[in-house]
Amino acid sequence: MALPINKVTNANVYAEGNSLLGKVMEFELPELSTKTTENNPLGMIGVTEHFAGFEKMEGVIKWQSFYKEVFDLTGDPFASKSLQLRANIDVYDSSGFTQVAAVVYLTCQFKKVPFGSFKAHENVELETDISVTAIKMEYDGATVLEYDALANIYKLNGVDKLATYRNNIGA
């Protein structure tokens, strides 16, 4: 069986369900990083690390230019916003070529209102930092990862990895 090769060359971003086609230059999605605690008890010759939660998630959006929608979206630091990144994945293997969808859903708050960097004869560069509280990734219609910091949810391929934890703390 041939090894499939996946390639993503473009995407579109949606904010609150509205397309931002042509307005976003780059969307740096957050990373989901675990926190660990060190364990070095008496009698053990080694030190181990164990899961202790997740770090905060942050991302960056680079805008193509000034748009009123960007100010409407980024201006309220008290409001959570829904973002969606939709990408087409080209999958190549020995049987040919197919395409599948990748969709990332985010709940976030904007940390900056961008006013830009001005240079003669160049487009204005605007950048916004986001703080992400929830993320869900779908690949070819199936949810592969879902994390919500405020609801204590972490699911991997549909398996709820925190069900016992929530039960144990009475949540």
Image: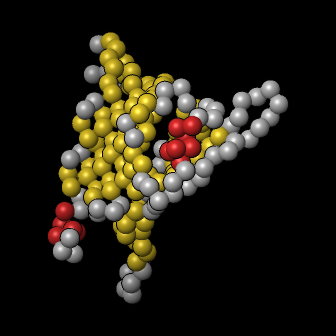
Tell me which residue sits at (23%, 58%) in the image: 161
**Residue placed farthest to the right in the image?**
120
- The answer to whether residue 119 is left or right of residue 43 is right
Image location of residue 156, percent across then percent down: 26, 49
Q: Quadrant of the C terminus?
A: bottom left
In the image, 122 versus 47, the foreground residue is 122
* Quadrant position of residue 141: top left
Question: The N terminus is located in which quarter?
Answer: top left
Which residue is more in the foreground, 125 or 165? Answer: 125
Farthest bottom residue in view? 42
Residue at 16% over, 70% down: 167
| Figure coloring | secondary structure
Where residue 143 appears, x then y in whole percent? 26, 41
Locate residue 166, reporting x and y percent: 21, 68
Q: Residue furthest top?
A: 96
Residue at point 52% right, 38% down?
A: 69
In this view of the protein, can residue 85 be seen by the observer? no
Residue 16 in percent (x, y) is at 39, 41
